[in-house]
Structures are given as C-alpha cells and as structure tokens.
Amino acid sequence: MKPVIAGLLRQIGLCMVLCHIPAAPAQSPAENELLLKTAFVFNFAKLTRWPANTWTEDAPMFNLCTAGSDDLVASLRHLDRERIAGHPVAIRPLQAADSPDGCHALYIAGSEHMSFLRWIDRTRSRPVLTISEIRGFADAGGAIQLFRDKDRIRFRINRDAARDRGLTLSARLLDLAVIVDTEAGR
C-alpha cells in the first residue's frame, strides 16, 4: 500500500473513532476521502462555540443545513443524530429560495459555485458556520473552506467571517488552519 494511502487510512480511522462514523471494510480512496471530509465538518462544528441564546426548548436540534448537491452532501447524512454542542444533529437540505433561519452550520456544495455568494450574504448577520469546498469561498466571506493540498485535505478559515456571525472558533482549530487575512484587503 502506498504510504500516502496508508496515512490517509490512519487519519480516517482516527476521525471515525472521534466522530463515531462506521467504517466499511473495503472502501475506495474516494469514499475514504468523503468520510474524512465528513469528519472534518463534524469537528469544525464541535470546535465552534455559538452565542448563548442560540438554542431554546422549542428548537433543541443542531441543524446542519446543506445547499446544493455533491458527494459530501450525501456523506454528511452519516452525522444525522450525532451530537454537537450537546444537541442532536439534524440534516436539513435547503433549496435556492430557502432561508437559512434555524441553521447552525451550512455546507454549500460545489453545485452552488455560481450562487455561493448569495448563501454567504444570507448568513452574514446570523450565527451560522458556513463551510464549502468552492474555490475562493473563505476569501469571499465564508467561514471555512476545505481544499486539497497535494495529497492532503486542508482547510482555510476566515476568522472575521466567523466572528462577524457571533461564532468563536477553538484555538486548536485555528492552529491547524490556513488563516485568511481579510483585514489586509480592506
């Protein structure tokens, strides 16, 4: 087995233990990458703090919303009923005309590459952790962008975007990220 794949499988195994995602015995590298990205999304949410008044007795669920479709949207279904911030996760697909009201995290799929800026704008004044793989997402005001760096999955964080939404990202998360400096562009 190539060292790169072996390393990826070790990472996936660790993430599956941390995220309680069941492992299938013989998965392809593409399937393993999807599970790894799913684990990343799960841990992004686990390492984020929302404002104190975010949850109420009437709305006890952690709503992980999705916009558009790609393979990761399908894989995120593994997180249904996991727990984030002490709340059971509910996966909630959104359509183009839907409001992100009630969403705590929003994964914007690659199919939304022409309209992702609208999703960013719709979440600007709300405590919604925005996540995508779309190129330029973090630079455009999204909170976290997954990307491939050679043979690794990495992520970029726009701290200003998260802070402007009232979210606090863990120092552990920030230490592992490539930080987008939006202050320099102002």
Image (spheres, rainbow, N blue to C red):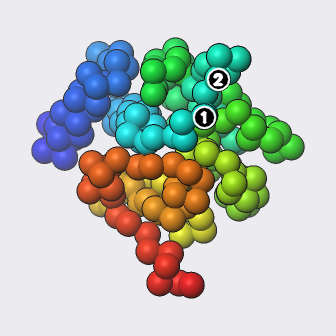
Q: Which of 71/109 is in front?
A: 109
Q: Quadrant of the N terminus?
A: top left
Q: Position of residue 57 (x, y in %)?
A: 65, 16
Residue picked out by circle 1: 53
Q: Quadrant of the C terminus?
A: bottom right
Q: Secondary structure at mark 1?
A: loop
Q: Which of 13/71 is in front?
A: 13
Q: Secondary structure at mark 2?
A: loop
Outermost residue on the right side: it is 97
Q: Position of residue 91 (x, y in %)?
A: 62, 25
Q: Position of residue 122 (x, y in %)?
A: 75, 53
Taking the image as shown, residue 98 lies to the left or right of residue 3, namely right
Name the residue located 30 percent from the left edge and 52 percent from the top edge: 171
Would you say the residues marked 2 and 1 are in contact, meaning their CB atoms lie under 8 Å apart? yes
Above or below, comparing residue 169 to residue 104 in the picture: below
Q: Amino acid at mark 1?
A: Asn
Quadrant of residue 62 within the rendered picture: top right
Name the residue located 61 percent from the left edge and 27 percent from the top edge: 55
Question: Which label is found at residue 4?
Answer: none
Quadrant of residue 10 within the rendered picture: top left
Q: Which of 107/1 is in front?
A: 107
* Number of residue marks: 2
Taking the image as shown, residue 28 lies to the left or right of residue 181, namely left
Is there any visible trace of residue 151 in the rendered image? Answer: no
Q: Amino acid at mark 2?
A: Thr
**Disc 1 crowd, CA 10 A, few/some/many (<14, 14-19, 20+):** few
Distance Cα–Cα, label 2 vs label 1: 7 Å
Is there any visible trace of residue 53 in the rendered image? Answer: yes
Q: Position of residue 79 (x, y in %)?
A: 49, 23
Residue picked out by circle 2: 56
**Disc 2 crowd, CA 10 A, few/some/many (<14, 14-19, 20+):** few
Name the residue located 50 percent from the left edge and 75 percent from the top edge: 182
